[in-house]
Image: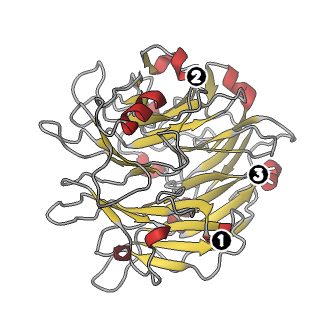
Amino acid sequence: MSTPLTSFDPPYTGLFLLSVGLLTGCPAPCEGAGCGALYPRASIGIFRAEDLDFADVDALSPALATNGADADGFDWAVLGVDSGLLLGIPAADQVRWHDGASLLRGGALTAVLPGGGTGERFGAAVALGEGIDGGTRLIVGAPARDAGPTLSAVGAVFLYEGADASLAGATAPQIVVGEHAEDHFGEGVWACGDLDADGLADWAATAPWASPGAAALAGSLSVALSATMPATLASSADLPQLFGGGDGARFGDAVSCSTSLDDDAFPELVVAAPYASGIARNGAGAVSIWTSPVDVAADPALVLSGSEPGANFGSAIAVGDLDGDGLSELVVGAPGADGGSGDDDATGAVMVYAGSDLRARLESEGILATPGPARTLRGEFARGNFGAAVHIADLDGDGVNDLVVGAPGTNSTGLASATRAGAATVWRGPYTAWPTTQFMSGAPTTVAADRQYLETGSVLATTDVDGDTMLELVLLTRIAREDP
């Protein structure tokens, strides 16, 4: 990582933004569609919290910025933990830790965990949760790992028992490999709560390209339930599995498994299949919910289905209390949803399902009708993909969570020079104060800049960099390649 372009003296209260742009202001060799290859790397920046009091925040004016190298790519996994950032860098086959103190001093790298080989995309997904005997467990996906000359990209998940966010103790991992070539097991990993009600935390990992039975690329989710964990675990085939129900569904693209939706002591398992198809609704998407204790042999307790072909309902999901009533809402992104520009304009949408409605439906065991969204947010720019990422956190410290929505394809000018500039919008809780339907321009705060291929809002996370108990928001976007 390079030295920061700008800095400021801590302490501060702020928004932490993995922001990408042409921070030097140098013109690109070309503009518009087809120039994305000129933007192969990422940059980290910090925005103060008071900046969020403004309607428009310039994504190219961070208080602090640190760039990645061309070889690091931009397809990073970002996890905010304690007062720092855990970053998966699959192009480099590494996981990196930046503690808060180092970030405040200018972003110096604190620790690096290398994978077991090269080209395995180690770090494509990272998670940290409770492990054996109450310790911590670091989970890292390596979805391009081979298992032999005829088993390419079966994928693997690395389990580091006892390892914490600083990567201390990350030695001698248990490696769980995928079953079939090109399954890409480990493309997503999650640290779950107690899904099987045995008093121990569980974990899950997806193989989005799995083709169970005759369903090509339907996807699968392996759920490591501690109550049924085999003594010897070497393959995803040793774990309970859930499968997508149709060709190309990408079941398991987004998962929540740490938060309750029915207000009991155990989390629900929420699994999205954003490319699932219904009758005359190709690629509409679906989100399935299993109540705890999870039984993978049972049908989901509730399925929410996308209503529009190509909407990709479920491309992103988030679960959290958005109105302060103690019940968790479910937020679902549908970045392919169309708006007013016509068919296939992919302006995008986000649906908020009320916690009270979800609890009532899950407790009724199917007696009540499937709830509809209590609130809908809509994008306004063609191919803006509003809803490609969603995140719930209390960013202003008022005790009520806020919602952040990414729209990485946004071009608010329509000019080639702002192709896929992107935007991240912040919506202040409680959601019950929002209109039933609201458009992207109604967001209290938008972080964006009219510069091509920033893709602001493609990744969302939060952390407390300075340890003041105030969360900062983390975004991942792109910058131009290094000068030769």
The residue depicted at 47 percent of the width and 37 percent of the height is: 452
Residue identifier under label 2: 430
> In front of the other: label 2 or label 1?
1
Nearest the camera: 219 or 484? 219
**Mark 2 or mark 1, which has the lower sequence index?**
1
What's the CA distance linking mark 2 and mark 1? Answer: 37 Å
Badge 1 is on which residue? 133
Q: Quadrant of the C terminus?
A: bottom right
Q: Is residue 45 left or right of residue 145?
A: right
Distance in Å between CA atoms under marks 3 and 2: 31 Å
Q: Is residue 396 above or below residue 4?
A: above
Distance, label 1 to label 3, CA atoms, is 32 Å
Question: From where the camera sits, is residue 466 visible?
Answer: yes
Q: Which residue is mark 3?
A: 103
Query: Amino acid type of disc 3?
Result: Leu
Q: Is residue 301 left or right of residue 332?
A: left
Kind of residue at badge 1: Asp
Vertical relation: 107 (above or below) 121: above
Circle 3 SS class: helix
Residue drawn at (87%, 40%), measured in percent from left and top?
11
Where does the image place residue 306, in percent across and percent down from the top left?
27, 35
